[in-house]
Image: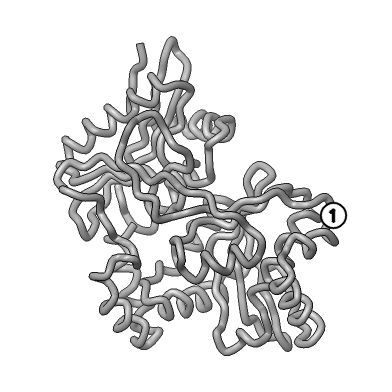
Amino acid sequence: MTAVRQLDAAETIQWDAYVAAHPEGTIFHLSAWKHAVERTFGHRPVYLCAERDGAWVGVLPLFKVSTLKGRALVSVPYGVYGGILADDEAAERALLAAAEAEAAKCDAKYIELRARHASALGLPENDLYVTFQRDLPATPEECLALIPRKSRASVRNGRTKFGVRSEFTSDFTRLYELYALNVRRLGSPTFPLRFLVALQESFGANIDVQHTLFEDRVVAAVLTFYDRGTMIPYYSGCDDNYFFTQCSNVMYCDLMEAGVKRGYRRFDFGRSRRGAGPYQFKVNMGFEPVTLHYQYVLRGLSELPRINPSNPKFELPRRIWSHLPLGVTKMVGPQLLKYIP
């Protein structure tokens, strides 16, 4: 029989070991993500572990959050992957039942599981999002050849004509400024700088920032996670005044080359909405989209929640937001983001 209970604070090492050993485990399942989200946003974690015959057979990281659609259990906030990790279908169903019981206790309107892979649970899914991943070559010199012809020419142009180059740093300040600019341009709220600080504290050496420079000015930056041979660029920003330098193309090619030098063999380009600008950029860089399986348990809603930029109801607020002063968006954005996990 499979029993499910909440994680004990003393079991963090065991939790992370299970996630690291599971083929579908991600950085967002790790306790480091839990600590950063809890510390920054104050959302209450409900981390469930399944046991059978004294051994762990599954885990499910959840947070209780208040959203624009009401209270919810989300796996996991501000992460693009999440959901149940289990040894078998019995453990998977036991964890889902425990999550449903937790949702009933807090009167959650829905449960959202941001899974990378399809399951046998038969839950309704939202197929709006895709992910992009590919293997890296054996040598840094081969990275450029992975990029399709037009984008490859942009990389070469940025490097030779404009002298764009990259370097690594432990300074998150410029990244935050560029990221805040980017999301304001897209009409979305930003997180507080302290979230980056919390991530740095939680992930330590498994996180860094790459600056991309034009005439010694940082015009683009990207934060990357490193996990079991995979590099995961996650938060990034580019000054639109310098788009002409092809800095974004150079930045990601430089990042792949640096990753190969450091022994990484897979590049996870992360999540994008179908048809959005980042989606097309990743396709143009030679990556193939793979559908993500965002699964839901609906308790108080008649349809899947659509708290995303593709919802036409958000079009006017997004346009207004994109024209607000940057200082206003950096001050108000983190308060809004608590409700858009």
Q: Which quadrant of the rendered structure holds the N terminus?
A: top left
Residue 161 placed where, x, y %? 79, 87
281 w.r.t. 184: above or below: above
Q: Which residue is most to the front?
A: 149
Identified at 72% across, 85% down, the residue is 216
Within-10-Å neighbours for mark 1: few <14, some 14–19, many 20+ = few
When asked about the image quadrant of residue 210, the answer is bottom right
Amino acid type shown at disc 1: Thr
- In this view, the residue in front, 229 or 124, is 124
Q: Position of residue 88 (x, y in %)?
A: 45, 21
Q: Quadrant of the C terminus?
A: bottom left
Give the residue pinned by disc 1: 139
**Colour scheme used in the picture?**
one colour
The residue at the point 54 percent across, 67 percent down is: 280
Measuring from the top left, give residue 186's x and y in whole percent: 41, 76
In the rendered view, tell whether residue 109 sits above or below residue 49.
below
Q: Could you tell whether 181 is left or right of 171 in the image?
A: left
**How many numbered dots are placed on residues in this image?**
1
Who's the residue at 36% across and 36% down the image?
47
Q: Is residue 206 visible?
A: no
The picture quadrant where one finds residue 59 is top left
Q: Is residue 7 above or below residue 144?
A: above
- Tell me where residue 215 appears, x and y as whole percent: 73, 88
Task: Specify whether 245 is left or right of 45.
Answer: right
Q: Nearer the viewer, residue 31 or 154?
A: 154
Q: Is residue 301 visible?
A: yes
Secondary structure of the residue carrying numbered label 1 = loop
The structure residue drawn at horizontal position 25% and vertical position 54%, both measured from the top left corner, is: 305
